[in-house]
Amino acid sequence: MRKLNELLSADDPAMPLVRQWLAESSHPIEVLQPSKNCAEVLVGLQVTTRSPMGAIVYETGGILIDHGWLRLLGSGHPKLPRNIVDWNFERSSGYLLFADDAVGGFFAINGGALGPDQGSVYYWAPDTLNWESLELGYSEFLRWALSDRLNVFYEPLRWPEWEASTQALAGDQCFTFYPFLWSEQGSVKTSSRKAISVAEQFLFNTDCLRQA
């Protein structure tokens, strides 16, 4: 285990570059203040602040993108009351969950459990319940999420006035749909939806995948 001073980079920190990317985004962005436990979270993650992930974890409580539709985990904040280390504890194996969205989709970095392409970002899609490789690393994913490509990616999973619905969600909530989006009858436009905890949605997805 590397200590905090070994993880902090004074010479080449990634956060200035991350802030530049955030400023250039066309999406509404909210950068949350870091938790008082940010150092502990960084040590638990064992990623240096030379990397965008380490910088985000240490210097933010998380980042809300596009009206809070997409949530990047950091050290935790009242608006996003999950930190990346605790969120992964006893929940993931062979991958690292680092982001999720308003429709119950989850993003993870493959550690070997999702395919041979270790380090690649995967999306656990709510409309298929399959882990799908985005063929991006974390830094590339961040640039992608801040670009207009996010709109194209999510177009099938959005409904009229989704912005207002999403803004009403808490950072530890997502929408669940019935009929389920992965079912033949499921659709964001016709299925009923309600807010549930992200933890509950993750557990439900896990159970469904196990029974498939």
Image (spheres, rainbow, N blue to C red):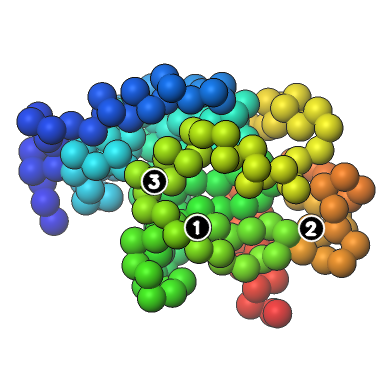
Q: Find disc 1 in the rendering and name its residue.
A: 134
- Label 1, residues with CA under 10 Å away: few <14, some 14-19, many ≥20: few
Residue 98 in the image, given as x and y percentages of width and height: 44, 49
Q: Nearer the viewer, residue 74 or 69?
A: 69
Q: Which mark is residue 149?
A: none
Mark 3, secondary structure of its residue:
helix
- Marks 1 and 3 in Cβ contact (< 8 Å): no
Q: What amino acid is at disc 2?
A: Leu
Residue drawn at point x = 49 percent, y = 46 percent? 99
Residue drawn at point x = 76 percent, y = 40 percent? 158
Residue drawn at point x = 9 percent, y = 29 percent? 10
Task: Classify residue 205 by image quadrant.
Answer: bottom right
Residue 193 in the image, given as x and y percentages of width and height: 83, 45
Is residue 40 at all visible to an observer of this figure? no
- Label 2, residues with CA under 10 Å away: few <14, some 14-19, many ≥20: many
* Inter-mark Cα distance, 1 to 3: 10 Å
| Mark found first going from the N terminus, 1 or 3 | 1
| Mark found first going from the N terminus, 2 or 3 | 3
Q: Find disc 2 in the rendering and name its residue.
A: 181
Q: Would residue 154 be found to the left or right of residue 90 on screen?
A: right
- Location of the C terminus by quadrant is bottom right
- Label 3, residues with CA under 10 Å away: few <14, some 14-19, many ≥20: few
Q: What amino acid is at disc 3?
A: Glu
* Inter-mark Cα distance, 2 to 3: 28 Å
Residue drawn at point x = 60 percent, y = 43 percent? 101
| Mark found first going from the N terminus, 2 or 1 | 1
Q: Nearer the viewer, residue 86 or 54?
A: 54
Q: What amino acid is at disc 1?
A: Leu
Is residue 119 at all visible to an observer of this figure? yes
Q: Which mark is residue 140?
A: 3
